[in-house]
Image (cartoon, rainbow, N blue to C red):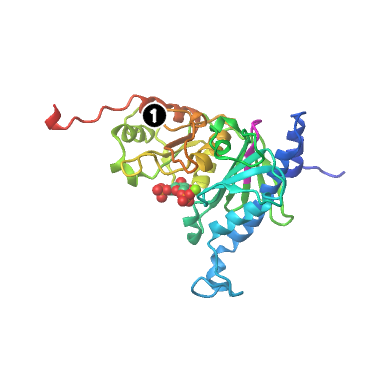
Amino acid sequence: MVKHTATSVVTIERYIIEQEKLHPEATGELSGILYDLALAAKMIANKVRSAGLADILGATDDINVQGEVQQKLDVIANEIIVKAVDHGGRLCAMASEEEPEIIQIPDNFRCGKYCLLFDPLDGSSNIDVNVPVGTIFSVVRKITRGARGEMEDMLQPGRRQVASGYVIYGSSTMLVYTTGQGAHGFTLDPSIGEFLLSHPNIRIPQMGRYLSVNDSYERLWDDNVRGLMRRYRGLDGERTPMSVRYVGSLVADFHRNLLGGGLFAYPANKKSPKGKLRLLYEANPLAFIVEQAGGAATNGGKRILDIEPADLHQRTPLYIGSKLDVEMATSMLANPVPEEQPLAAR
Ligand code: AHM
Ligand code: MG
């Protein structure tokens, strides 16, 4: 008798179709954007995999073997995404962490009803040392009337996202996405070039094992942030200590915490009063995913998905991950430890 394995083989393409059927009114346009992004992810994965060879295959002074100027991988990733999605007739505009202005759909292509916002290669400074990097994306519906996307379409709060996701280029390449019906993960099988469903309906543990924070900024934090980090580490005896894991690549840190439980924090500090991470390209898409997985995300005072964006490249402090750990941040930062009064003011 033939023995079958317990799990079925489901490609991302089939999964997206199945999910789309849950929405009878769906036109298939959003699904089309997701396929195109999966294709872009495979192309970027291919480039990332051979990144370490650039110096050998290319010549010096940033000129490659064809005599072309070598582009940095984050610029290449940006280009790959734009070219994978700009002609499908599904998008009315894009915005990228790599580009200062809105990216318009070329005149010769039709405009659609969605906007795509993305960080093409997050953590790209890690490429040179072979540490995982990622792509993050967010899709919102167009709200203005004209054919082309405008700033107002881009600056929508994260709760209006219709899809978001990320790709991690790690020991394997994984794509995790949500359309508001759970967060689902797919692993790239490089031998057949397909993303296969490997992590259906991801659930993040309510409390985490890992704390991901760059504590070299400790001297620049407010007392309340310092107090919160002490609590996470169990130094005030109020919580089981968390272990610190910090890759310095948001997608990698987030992904580990999503699967195993934990909290990623990039607090505001005296040098970066708004934190470092971008609301539209990093915080919002990951916040949508984490909430779909049963976790939470805040800037310390407000749910990330409720922040009204004012600027395309706006930054935000970010506390994201296991629900109870994020709630700890909300309660401790909303009731900040009073600042020490300078002697002269007492
Ligand atoms: P980038 O978008 O310029 O790559 O910066 C974002 C990265 C994140 O991946 C990571 O979490 C963070 O910057 C690390 O910053 P720091 O070195 O200050 O800890
Ligand atoms: Mg980034």
312 above or below 296? below
Q: Is residue 197 visible?
A: no
Name the residue tied to disc 1: 239
Q: Nearer the viewer, residue 210 or 86?
A: 86
Q: Amino acid at mark 1?
A: Arg
Please report the residue visible at 58 percent of the width from the left and 71 percent of the height from the top: 68
Badge 1 marks a residue whose secondary structure is loop
> Which quadrant holds residue 228?
top left
Q: Quadrant of the N terminus?
A: top right
Residue 181: where, in percent of width, then height?
66, 30
> Which quadrant holds residue 17?
top right
Q: Is residue 178 magenta?
A: yes
Instruction: State left or right for residue 337 relative to residue 326.
Output: left
Q: Is residue 166 magenta?
A: no
Residue 313: where, in percent of width, then height?
48, 43
Instruction: State left or right for residue 182 relative to residue 245.
Output: right
> Which quadrant holds residue 293?
top right
The stretch in magenta equals 175-182
Residue 115: where, in percent of width, then height?
62, 41
Please report the residue visible at 61 percent of the width from the left and 52 percent of the height from the top: 172
Q: Residue furthest right?
A: 1
